[in-house]
Image (tube, coloured by chain):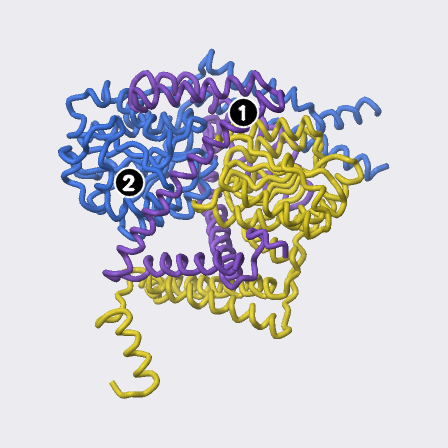
Chain colours: A blue, B yellow, C purple
Amino acid sequence: MAKKDNLSERLSKIDNRVIFLLLAICLGLPLLIPIGLPLGISTGTSSFYKYVEGLPSGSLVACVYEISASVSPEVYPQAVAVTAHLKSRNLKIVALGFSVTGPMFADNAFRDVFGASREHELYGKSFVNLGYIAGGEAAMKVFATNPRMVEKDFYGRDTKDMQILQEVSSPKDFKLMIVYSGDWMEPYVRQFGDPHGVPIASGVTSTIVPRIMAFYPAKIKGYLTGLRGAAEYELLVKRPGSALGGMDAQSAAHLLIIGLVIAGNAGYLVGRFRRKEA
Amino acid sequence: MQQTPCGLIYQLFTVCVGDDLLEIAKGTLSCLVLLAACSILMIIMLYAARKGRVPKIRKIPAVDAIDEAIGRATEMGRPVHYSTGTGDFYGYDAMVTIAGISVLGYVAKKIAQYNTPLIVTFMSPEVEPVVADVVKQAYLAAGRPDAFKPDMIRFISQRQFAYATGVIGILNREKVAANVMIGHFMGEAMIIAEAGYMAGAVQIGGTANTIQLPFFVAACDYTLISEEVYAAGAYLSKDPLQLGAVAGQDWARLVGVVLIGIGTILATLGVTWVADILKL
Amino acid sequence: MKIKLPLAITTIILVLMVADYFVKDPLLNPLVRDLTKAILIMTACAVGIGVIRLIKLNVDRITVRKTNRLESAITLIAFAAFVIVGAILGSGHPNYAYMFNTIIVPLDSTMFALSGFYMASAAYRAFRARSEEAFVLLLAGVVVMLGQAPVGEVLWSATPSLSQWIMDVPNTAGVRALIMGIAIGMLSLTIRMITGHEKGYLASGE
């Protein structure tokens, strides 16, 4: 009897260090020994992909990199997969960031997809990195009224004569605004979506998706959900990368957490039942 | 135009704004009307409270728990940690930061009365002078100006996770008994809240960032959910006028509920009047 | 005056900014645009405040308080390195990008990854079926977690659609309600501020 009581108590009070160790094993092992579970495409990713596919060739797309270093493992693979898709559709990319680190990831994405950034022959014609625009939502408001406000790009070059920017005179010239973010999306809906009717799509961390759903599909045309969204997009554009490689680890970790929750509840309910009996 | 009072007001109006009437931006008329209606409701309730009709506000358990948490810390002789989060005064997080600082004023005054150690942390440096002033004034109001120490106000870093690690260090080293986090929080919310739990502190969390609310609910003992953060200052002050404005908040919400209800029923029946009016 | 002047400034700017959103006027819109640019300049100055504060804090630790001197020295050296490289070469230079990608990115992402571990322990502790509502929450959480991982579809083919339904219907309804509530709460706080009844942040001592 005492042994069974101890078991239910132990199940409901597992030491945090044991949880951390198990989670580390569940995350690390599938990265070393991949399983290769099949992956379906979710609604948000499908909407995102179809919207980009539907854009006419040569359309201007604004890519706002709100990626901080902390969320980059989740969101950066999305940016790479989407940039590859935009390149394959001959869409023109105007990259910018309202956070300090965003343009650095834009530069990384261009290097990963185009092979180079500012040195590329198409830089300034097919893609450009406008760099960091300080000021948060106030800066978004100013940019929305004057997208040519940035006089020097991320690399310090003059933007006045850049071919790609000759087509930009108002936010309506952007056929799509893609926001890669680890934070809120509302400022973009407030400053670009509502007043100027710019369609918005987003690549975000999984924790933000519940909030994105409130604006989908009226204001936000499609969304990518964290690492899974990146993996799905990599499948769609046939460019496997780190996101697809992380799916097995994600599966194992989720199963572990569910198992722990079930174990904790089992211990709790058995304990409660025994206390009632006593 | 006749020289009636209305005519004169109209003439004055057109002189001020030009010959044409103001052009309302497309798609914002219904928002303007709703904003005006909700504001008027709140102002009416505020001034009704001034006339003596003070509304009863339901208990907010998380706010009531602040006193308990301070009492616990006092008994244990351990400090209270208060965080206003990662917000500043110029972004979308400004309002919730202000709400957090309002509650800080109350907490600091209470702590000053009990002579409990207080540690206040925040991420944005421009918040520091306001926070320092609020705490200092609270100690002054409690009659204990000598007990205020500038060391209570600790700027750690402007970087999110550097700030989080600094707070974790404080929670563990100082053996904090109560951890109150009211303000704008992002990814560090979970880390700080769980670290506070592991340090054995009683925790009260509150944020308007719906993304982080589930983490607070999971890790904190009490949570202020969305608009409770904005009502907390009024609730604690017990100022009848502020409570009136909070009641106005509920009336405004009722307007929204009625519109949603009517619009949903009509839309289900294929009538889109409400949706069309709201698109104006 | 200490209270009335900031309140007056707040109210005037509030009215102008709100009016700009709703009204198209050849006088008002450019005025607010210029005001917004002024806010941008103030924001940029705020970044400077952070830098000065950081330097002062760490120099104090090394010279006056003599605590955590090594950590403060590392902070200042790293700060100086990034500023010097960034100022001389520019933040778009490959060398600066190398420093960013090899130092900042791994450090920041490691810290954020900690939240995953903490979430596991918090979920284990918090997801207990103490009541009917808690049980429903637990069930919804399990279904959404399974829906997020490929293994969910392998275990049961309906998991993704069930998870999507939970996100589309109850979650969206709740989040929209929360967002509306927050907006109304902000409006209430604004009205309390401009009518002078919310003075907690002004440190008036009242």
For residue B61, the mark is: none
Provide residue B6's location: percent of width, then percent of height.
33, 83
Q: Is residue A244 above or below residue B53?
A: above
Provide residue B128's location: percent of width, then percent of height.
54, 40
Q: Is residue B99 above or below residue A258?
A: below
| Chain identifier of the residue bearing label 2 in the image | A
Which corner quadrant of the image does residue B91 belong to?
A: top left
Could you say which is closer to the camera, residue B217 or residue B135? B135
> Given the image, on which type of amino acid does mark 2 rest?
Met
Do labels 2 and 1 touch, CB within 8 Å?
A: no
Discs 2, 1: same chain: no
Q: Residue furthest right?
A: A278
Q: Dot 2, crowdedness within 10 Å: few (<14), some or many (≥20)?
A: many
Q: Is residue B127 left or right of residue C42?
A: right
For residue C58, the mark is: 1
**SS at badge 2:** strand
> Given the image, on which type of amino acid does mark 1 rest?
Asn
| Chain identifier of the residue bearing label 1 in the image | C
Q: Dot 1, crowdedness within 10 Å: few (<14), some or many (≥20)?
A: many
- Identity of the residue drawn at 24% across and 85% down: B1
Quarter of the picture holding the C terminus of chain B = bottom left
Could you say which is closer to the camera, residue A272 or residue A109? A109
Residue identifier under label 2: A177
Q: Is residue B179 left or right of residue C8?
A: right
Provide residue B210's location: percent of width, then percent of height.
51, 44
Which corner quadrant of the image does residue C117 belong to?
A: top right
Residue A79, can we see it?
yes
- Identity of the residue drawn at 69% across and 29% down: B174
Q: Is residue C20 left or right of residue B185?
A: left
Residue A216, can we see it?
no
Which corner quadrant of the image does residue A47 belong to?
A: top left
**SS at badge 1:** helix
